[in-house]
Amino acid sequence: MGSFDVVTGGAGFIGSHLVDALIAQGRNVLAIDDLSVGRRSNLAAHDGNPKLRFIEASVVDRGRMVELLDGADRVFHLAALADIVPSVENPQRYFDANVNGTYAVAEAARQHGVKRLLYAASSSCYGIAQIYPTPETAAIDPRYPYALTKYLGEQTVLHWGQVYGIPVTSLRLFNVYGPRARTSGTYGAVFGVFLAQKLAGKPLTIVGDGTQTRDFTFVTDVVHAFIAAAERGRSGAVYNVGSGATVSVSRLVELIDTPEIRYIPKRPGEPDCTFADTTRIASEIGWRAQVPIEAGGRRAAGQPRILARCTGMDARRHRRGDPKLVQVYQESLTASLGASERPCRSGKALALHCPAAAPTAQRRGPQASASR
């Protein structure tokens, strides 16, 4: 296989898109996934492609990580367990996957002297933020085991970089959505769950009252952030990865355009607004999000055939090596962005979408005591 990149969680939502992009660049890729969350069908477009090697394995298995990372150039560590409620119900499982698994990957990377270790961190580490847009220097306040374990994973990676000299970079991701998003579970990622409900003809379930706002970030934008950070990111740096705008959950429902909705109780410890300050990643490596939610949500919801193909629902219909990777990748992006639409970054738009956002200055967010 020669030199190669490793993507842990490579059959997952974000990981499989990253595999697509790396192979499209001509890189050799080793995708590692235990398939507890990811789907092998997410990589069906690469069946028979010698540039991809897939290994079903758990990152918690330290010996296996040492074996598999031997010879790797770069490691993109995306494997993790997500979701709030399951982490409260079973914290041990989350510590095993998100903390011990990250240690196993970081230590294997150290032993083999990889050129770069990139970590997929979570914006949930900010808890109920006190500043909007929220910079990387904001207070850390994890409110549930998932958020805590992802932050401990980030600290592990950064510590290994500081002590052992491994070039490491952490990306704190804000509300990623797009094709292949997980669509199962009452408490799954909101965009993927909404699309699955729409395609099934079911009412959309809104957590809380729908006025909460989120910094939804399209998956291909996130992939481009990882690649930019791998190529130009500062070692030891932490970067927010967000869209530069926010939108309410109710507005998302409008974009998906469905007549029926139902409400379920708000999840404990969730903020009313997430909104990334992306100044650092823009100034240091030149990355900016390109896909606005207005285009991504409307176009993806209106393209069920593209959604089904990109989520792997009809992967069995693909002949080996067909369709071509770049065609699938570009089609999904084009369906979300549109030929004439551009990202909306105006202060006016931000103020309309996020009550906490100010176009020219940061505002104090809701106090923790007021949210309880």
Image (cartoon, helix red, strand yellow):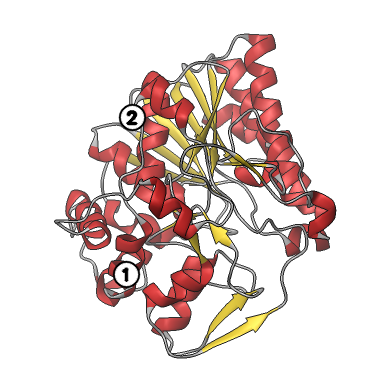
Which circle marks residue 176 in the picture? none
Q: CA distance from mark 2 to mark 1?
A: 40 Å
- Which residue was labeled with disc 2? 1
Q: Is residue 152 above or below residue 315?
A: above
Q: Quadrant of the C terminus?
A: bottom right
Q: Is residue 270 above or below residue 114?
A: below
Mark 1 residue type: Arg
Mark 1 residue element: helix
Percent across and percent down for residue 44 are 32, 58
Percent across and percent down for residue 256 are 38, 76
- The answer, for residue 14, to whether it is visible in the render is yes
Residue 311 figure quarter: bottom left
Mark 2 residue element: loop
The residue depicted at 45 percent of the width and 33 percent of the height is 6
- Which residue was labeled with disc 1? 298
Q: Is residue 149 above or below residue 45?
A: above
Percent across and percent down for residue 325 are 22, 51
Mark 2 residue type: Met
The residue depicted at 48 percent of the width and 16 percent of the height is 234
The residue depicted at 19 percent of the width and 59 percent of the height is 338
- The answer, for residue 218, to whether it is visible in the render is no
Badge 1, how many Cα within 10 Å: few under 14, some, many 20+? some
